[in-house]
Structures are given as structure tokens and as C-alpha cells.
Amino acid sequence: MRKVLAAAGTVALLASAALAQTATPQSGGGLADKLINQPGTAPWYVFGASQTNEALPNGGPQGYPATRVTVAAKGANPWDAGAVSPIAKPIGAGDTLLVAVYLRAPMLKDGETTPISYFGLGQSAAPYEMIVSGSANLTNQWKLFYASGKAAKAYPAEGVSVGVHLAADKHVVDLGPVKVFDLGPDFDPARLPKNQ
């Protein structure tokens, strides 16, 4: 059990450190080589009639870029407003995947939270299958959230994207850096970090 917890802690620390780097990763056999998106170059594309959004060039954690989305009204569905970020590389059947994304709700008071009913990885086109997913309760501070699991089947390059559903409430949400790691078919998802 200690080895599993240590491995999860190591992956969490490495994911956090890797998220702090927005440049294209250098090859060298580390966690950065497992990236399948292009953080720092792949922006958030925001959609929905009830939202407005703006770029925050230095407004993210540690001064990195972010996107602020203001949702004017709770939607009939959580996905009535949202954001997506494309994935450049293919995914193999049975591969273990980790999505790590910074999120916050900057207008909340200390102690308040607002819900994100879904974030994760899914198909970019119909039938929009979810591959891995999570939910989160945001505070007014940047926090790293995780979604992980195994891909049930293979997906082509540019066939999937990270998505965040934003219409679960009327709120302001900041979307920070996101990284997606493909750890291959032999990595046990139980070893990956979980949201607190």
C-alpha cells in the first residue's frame, strides 16, 4: 500500500511540475514524453449562448495564461456552456489516461464553492463518448483537478478533446493550463492521483 501511495504522490508531483511548464516538452523518457496534448499552444475554445469569455494572458497559476468564462445563467443542461481543448495525438485501446487541469472560481468568497459537473476527455464529434471524466467543486483559489481511467477503445489523432461543462450554475470560472498524459496499457489507474 505504501508503494502505491508513493507512486500516486510521485505522479501527482510530476503532473503538477509538468503543468507548470507550458513549453513543448523535451524528450528524455520522463512524464513529459507521455503528453498527448500541446499545453501552451492548444487554447480553450469556449461555447454556449449564456457565456462570455476573455483571455487572461498572465492570469493563470504562476502567471501562465488562462481563460475566464462568465456564465450568465444556469443552463437546462450542464453542457449548454463549456470549453474544449483539442488533443493532437492518438490514444490506444486499453491505455491509461490522466487529465490534469487547473480551475478556479475567482469571484467566490472564502469558503464558498461552485460545481463543475463534468470535466474530462471525450470524443470531439458525435456520439461524443466520454473516455475519462471527473467532477469538481471550485473555490476562489487555483487548484489542480484530475480525471483518469482506461480507454475502452482506440481513438485517432485529433479525435478527442478535453472538455469542461460550465452551465451547472451561474458563475465565473477560470480555466488554466491542462495536460493530458497517455501512460500506456500497463499502467494501473489506481496509482494515479485523485481529487481531494
Image: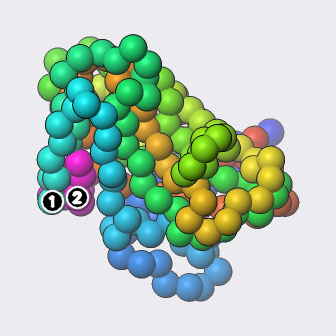
3D distance between C-alphas at marks 2 and 1: 4 Å
As drawn, is 21 to the left or to the right of 90? left
User: Is 44 placed above or below 104 here?
Assistant: below
As drawn, is 125 to the left or to the right of 175? right
As drawn, is 167 to the left or to the right of 106? right
Outermost residue on the front side: it is 126
- Residue drawn at point x = 18 percent, y = 42 percent: 53
Please say if the residues under marks 2 and 1 sit with CB atoms less than 8 Å apart.
yes
**Amino acid residing under circle 1:** Pro
Along the viewing direction, whichever of 58 and 170 lies nearer the viewer: 170
Q: Residue 124: x percent and y percent?
A: 55, 51
Whether residue 13 can be seen here? no
**Amino acid residing under circle 2:** Pro
Which label was assigned to residue 65? Answer: 2
Q: Quadrant of the N terminus?
A: top right
Which label was assigned to residue 76? Answer: none
Task: Give the residue at mark 1.
Answer: 57
Q: Which stretch did the figure color magenta?
A: 58-67
